[in-house]
Image (cartoon, grey):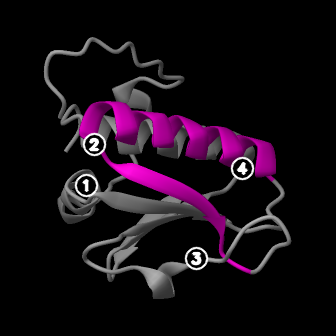
Amino acid sequence: MKQGLETRLTFTYSPIEVNITEIPAEAIERIKNSPFVYLSSEPNSTSLEDVALAQYQLQQVLASQFNVQSSIAFTRPNNQTFSIGCENASQYVPVIVFEDANQTATIYQDNCLRLQAANPSAFIALRDRTVYGLLGILK
């Protein structure tokens, strides 16, 4: 984490509210110790605004607190950006994928963290949970 700079972070949910969702320590360490991370989502998500907000806010935290650069992409080709999915993840460039799902959960496999949300607000909760993990507030 960067030292000497004071940054105010804003959360929507408290650690207690998001602690029901676990994120493996290996995923947190891989993300915060990587020079670059892709933040990807489904182009046809029913929660595009919430996903975009969660991605943007996570992008700001990664850059300001951990000096981790990132780029936003879609999981499938789109006219406005390139496609990046879990198949593109590596130990040097992990991928965080925001996905619509039937239940809210996280899956970490092969350097890819899948943040699955059952509803639009769950994307913000998953973003908060990820940031709390990155900062060491939640394990």
Q: What residue sits 59% from the left and 64% below the top?
A: 40
In the picture, the disc for residue 119 is: 4
Q: Which amino acid does label 4 sit on?
A: Asn
Q: What residue sits 18% from the left and 36% below the top?
A: 136
Instruction: Mark 4 or mark 3: name the one nearer the start of the chain.
Output: 3
For the image, the number of numbered tags is 4
Q: In this view, does 111 lie to the left or right of 127?
A: left
Mark 2 neighbour density, 10 Å: few (under 14) some (14–19) many (20 or more): many
Mark 3 in CB contact with mark 1 (< 8 angstroms):
no
Residue that label 3 marks: 84
Could you give the CA–CA distance between mark 1 and mark 4, rounded to whole angstroms? 23 Å
Instruction: Mark 1 or mark 4: name the one nearer the start of the chain.
Output: 1
Could you give the CA–CA distance between mark 1 and mark 2, rounded to whole angstroms? 6 Å
Could you give the CA–CA distance between mark 4 and mark 2, rounded to whole angstroms? 21 Å
In the depicted view, which residue is nearer to us: 126 or 48? 48
Mark 3 neighbour density, 10 Å: few (under 14) some (14–19) many (20 or more): many
Q: What element carries label 3?
A: loop
Which residues lie in the magenta part? 47-76
